Amino acid sequence: MKRAFSFLFIFLNFLIFKNLAFAQPEVDECLNFYEAGNYKRAIEAGKIAVIKYPNNSDAHFCLGKIYYEIGDLELALEHAKRAESLTSNKIQLIYIYYLIGEIYTGMRNVDYQLLYYGKSLSFLLNLEDKSMQREVAKNILMMLEYKSKLDKALGYYEESLRLMTDKKAKAIAYKNIAFIYEKKGDYQKVAEYLQKAIELAENYGDYHIASKWKLILGDMYIRMKDYEKGEKYILEGLEGVKKVGDKYMTAQGYHYLGWLYKNKGDNETAKEYLTRAYNLYYSIGAEFSARAVLSDIQNLEKKR
C-alpha cells in the first residue's frame, strides 16, 4: 500500500508554482530552491519569508507546498490553511485549495480532499485556463478510486481518450489509466498504458516527465519480476532526470534500483543503491523519503 500511495504522489503533475508571481524576494527564493529540487534550502528560505512577512499568503503557500513535498503533512496543512486565511483573491485560492486537497489526499481524508478539490474547481470554472481545469477535475475523479469506484473512473478516462486531440492531455489520461490499473493489481496493463504515456510525452518534447514515468515503469517491471526490463527503464529514467538536475527523482531511481537488486538477491549492490538514495534524499531535505529508504536498509541488514 505504501508503494502504491507513493505512485500517486510521483504521478500528480501539479501546476501550482508556474502561475503565481511572488512579490517578495524571500518567497521567490523559496520557489527557486523548490524548482531546483533542493527542499532543505527551500524550507530555510520559506521560514525566513513567513517570519519576515507573517501575513503574506504567498509565503505560507510556498512553505506549505515544500512541507507537502517532503511528507510533513501536519506542517503543510498548517501553512496552507494560514495561506487560505490571508487572501480573498480567487486565483490564489484556486491554488491554495488545490494544495489543501493534495495534503488531505496524503492524510487519506477522502471527504476533505474532495471538498477542497471541489472548491478549487468551482473557482476555476469561471476562468479561461482550461488546462488547469482539466488538472483539478482529473484529481477529483481520481478520488473516486478511493471510494472503490475504479471501474467508473476507468470508464471516464477511456471515454475521454476518444474525444481528446491534444497530445499532452492524452498522455496524462494514459498515465491516469495506468494508475487505476496499478491499484487493481494489473501490472501488465500498467506497463501498457505507461508506455503509451511515455511515447506521447517524448513526442511533444517533455523528456523530463517521460523520464519520471520511465522510473515508475521500471518499478512495475520489478513487481512483475522482469528485472531486465525493470533495470532498462530505470536506467533510462535516471539518465533523463539527471540531465535536468531533478535530485528528488534521481534519488527515487536509486531507490528503485535498490529494490531491484534486493529482489535479485544481490544485497550488497542493493545496499549501495539504497545508501545513494538515502544520502541524496537527506541532502535535499526530503526527510520522509529518506526515512523510508533507511527502513529498507535496516531490513536488508537484518537478513544478513
Image (spheres, rainbow, N blue to C red):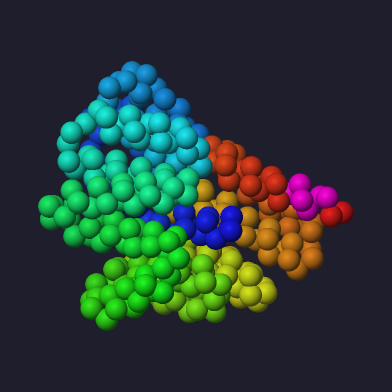
Q: Residue 250 location in percent, x, y?
A: 54, 53
Q: Residue at x 75, y 68 (%)?
A: 264
**Residue that protrudes farthest toward the bottom in the picture:** 162
Q: Is residue 299 left or right of residue 94?
A: right
Q: Residue at x 31, y 48 (%)?
A: 115
What span is colored magenta in the figure?
297-302
Q: Is residue 137 left or right of residue 256?
A: left
Q: Residue at x 50, y 37 (%)?
A: 72
Q: Is residue 205 left or right of residue 130?
A: right
Residue 163 covered by magenta stretch: no
Q: Residue 194 location in percent, x, y?
A: 46, 73
Q: Quadrant of the N terminus?
A: bottom right
Q: Is residue 240 visible?
A: no
Residue 299 covered by magenta stretch: yes
Q: Is residue 143 left or right of residue 298?
A: left
Q: Residue 108 location in percent, x, y?
A: 47, 49
Q: Residue 68 location in percent, x, y?
A: 44, 41
